[in-house]
Amino acid sequence: MKGIVLISGSGSNLQSIIDNAKNIDLDIQAVISNNKDAYGLTRAQAANIPTHAIDHKQFFSREEFDQSLSQTIDQYNPGIVILAGFMRILTPEFTKKYEGKMLNIHPSLLPKFQGLNTHQRAIDAGESEHGVSIHFVTAELDGGPVIAQSKVKVIKNDTAESLAKRVLTEEHQLFVQVIHWFTQNRLKLNNNIATLDNKAL
């Protein structure tokens, strides 16, 4: 299945997806970033994957940025759009256009800790466990139907950095698994419910 990956930063999840692409029936057509200095673009170039940097600061509105992003995506006619650390709030028009084929990874056990700084917030809240969620993207920020989660224990002397490191290990494994479900046409979004093999998740 042809796919596009959107990133904003270092691209460690992107690297995991690149490394496993053949095994999960994914043909990465391009990597797009809103940050021209994102290290993930270097990772993609090293794998001979086309890259695009679309600087959101060059646009007057979210709508204009999303239109440019959408035009770039549509050049490749992808079957899946993967948000792997893409740090932009997308407009409802954009999310509607790709609804059902856009997946996001979020470093918390949604619906807990939507938004940023999830690891520190989990520690500050005294959580005993934390983790990662993969979900379909809808207009609600980090609020689309959750497909899968992986948990880690919060240890007594954890810092945001130590907790993030353990969660990242889970992210790399879980995201690849969920993408494979999608490329096998087993994972679908039906009436705002995530289903695997026609069973609600």
Image (spheres, rainbow, N blue to C red):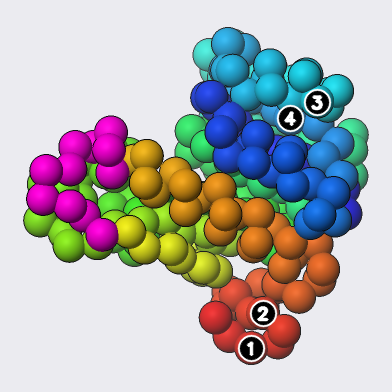
Q: What residue type is labelled 2?
A: Leu
Could you tell me the amino acid type at mark 3?
Ala
Whole-percent x, y for residue 34 in the image: 60, 22
For the residues labelled 4 and 2, the Cα–Cα distance comes to 27 Å
The image position of residue 16, as x and y in percent, is 64, 41
Provide the residue designation for mark 1: 199
Element on which disc 1 rests: strand
**Residue marked by disc 4:** 31
- Secondary structure of residue under mark 3: loop
Of the image marks 4 and 3, the number of the one nearer the N terminus: 4
Residue range (magenta): 153-163
Marks 3/1: CA distance? 36 Å
Q: Which residue is denoted by mark 3 in the rendering?
A: 47
The answer to whether the residue labelled 4 contacts the one labelled 2, judged by CB atoms less than 8 Å apart, is no
Percent position (x, y) of residue 59? Answer: 59, 17
What is the secondary structure assignment of the residue under circle 2?
Answer: strand
Label 1 vs label 4: CA separation? Answer: 32 Å
Q: N-terminal of the two: label 2 or label 3?
A: 3
Q: Which of marks 2 and 3 is in front?
A: 3
Seen in the picture, residue 152 relative to 48 is either above or below; the reply is below
Near-viewer residue (137 or 112): 112
Is the residue 106 above or below the residue 34 in the image?
below
In the displayed structure image, the side of residue 37 where residue 167 appears, left or right: left
